[in-house]
Amino acid sequence: MSLSQDNKLLYIQPMKKIDIGSYKINSDIRLADLNTSENLDSTDKELKKKLEKLREDLGDFQNKLYAHGKYAVLICIQGMDTAGKDSLIREVFKDCNVRGVVVHSFKVPTELELDHDYIWRHYIALPPKGKFGVFNRTHYENVLVTKVHPEYILNENIPNINSVADIDEQFWEKRYEQINNFERHISENGTLIFKFFLNISKEEQRQRLLRRLRLQEKNWKFSPGDIKERNLWDNYQRCYEEAINKTSKPNAPWYVIPADNKRASRLIVATILLESLKKYKDIQEPELDDEIKANIEIYKSKLEKEK
């Protein structure tokens, strides 16, 4: 509460508590039924201030993760064009040690990558133990972009796939199974997996594309391909919905994040990460060797005498 100049008590509504479970996908969903906008009953200034504190804590946890050395953390970010993937990564991990966070942005597969199976380039980019790995676009592009444009699959030179007609529903079901197996394997070997879909509305995307065209300093972000892909909005929504429903598992859950408000979406993602990671009580700094611990005062004294 605060006192106004008129000596009237004004009640300040606290920030809405973030219930991380409300964003986690535990059963089949329809994206059309889920919110794309959330402000957490807060101003932009309040959201920014809260994120600043959270990301400091996230940075401290990453240091502890590194010292512990038995887990890696994989953060997968997916979303339609303009959903805010780049800025979310920049803002959420700003206070982490730069050596503790490795970001990979996956583009169109290279010739070398196409000479391997489709998961290969993602496997070799996985974070080592002690680090956060962030995938900006992920292995899910292989059941999203390629499902909307199945002709891209032909570039992979897969046995018995000679034309688009050979790519049937069984093909996609097998891919979902392969992705689930991949994630199960790495999770069983110490990688903690978080998958975020930034759920932006079609109208908000239109406004963000217009902003790229209206602001000269943003023009470089625009591509005519953005309009072409926007025309396939409904196709992409169906593919995202199916991929999320087929692959949200306890070891690798999906979280659908309302993304029309960028500041709120960043805070929600940071909260999910920090609260979920803190549940791993075994992640602690290692105890000092008994001999070192017993001689700490001696080491301090030697260093202090160097003045």
Image (cartoon, rainbow, N blue to C red):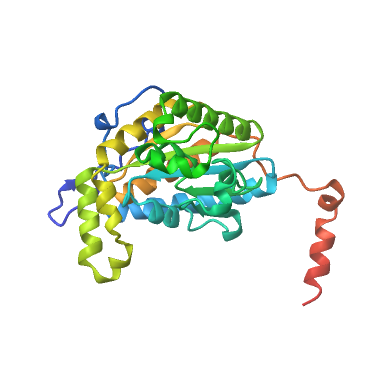
Q: Residue at x 52, y 31 (%)?
A: 160
Q: Is residue 51 above or below residue 276?
A: below
Which residue is outermost to the front?
Answer: 162
The residue sitting at 24% across, 52% down in the picture is 227
Closer to the camera in the image, 299 or 15: 15
Question: Which residue appears at 41% of the width and 31% of the height?
Answer: 243
* Residue 158, position as x, y percentages in the image: 54, 37
**40 with respect to 287 (left or right):** left
Vertical order, 112 against 147 (above or below): below
Image height check: is 27 above or below 130?
above
- The spot of residue 265 in percent (x, y) is 35, 46
Figure quadrant of residue 285 = top right
Quadrant that contains the C terminus = bottom right
Q: Work out whether residue 22 or residue 149 is closer to the camera in this orientation and state it.
A: 149
- Can residue 230 be spotted in the picture? yes
Q: Nearer the viewer, residue 306 or 229?
A: 229
Q: Residue, x 44% and y 29% (percent of image)?
A: 172
- The single residue placed furthest to the bottom in the displayed view is 307
Q: Is residue 4 left or right of residue 158?
A: left
Is 147 drawn above or below residue 245 in the view shown?
A: below
Residue 104 at x, y percent in the picture = 52, 53
Q: How many marks?
A: 0
Spot occupied by residue 35 in the image (x, y as percentages of width and height): 26, 35
Foreground: 10 or 188? Answer: 188
**Image position of 302 (left or right of 14):** right
Tell me the quarter of the picture where residue 153 sits: top left
Q: Quadrant of residue 150?
A: top left
Res. 24 visible in picture: no
Residue at the limit of the structure toward the right, as seen here: 291
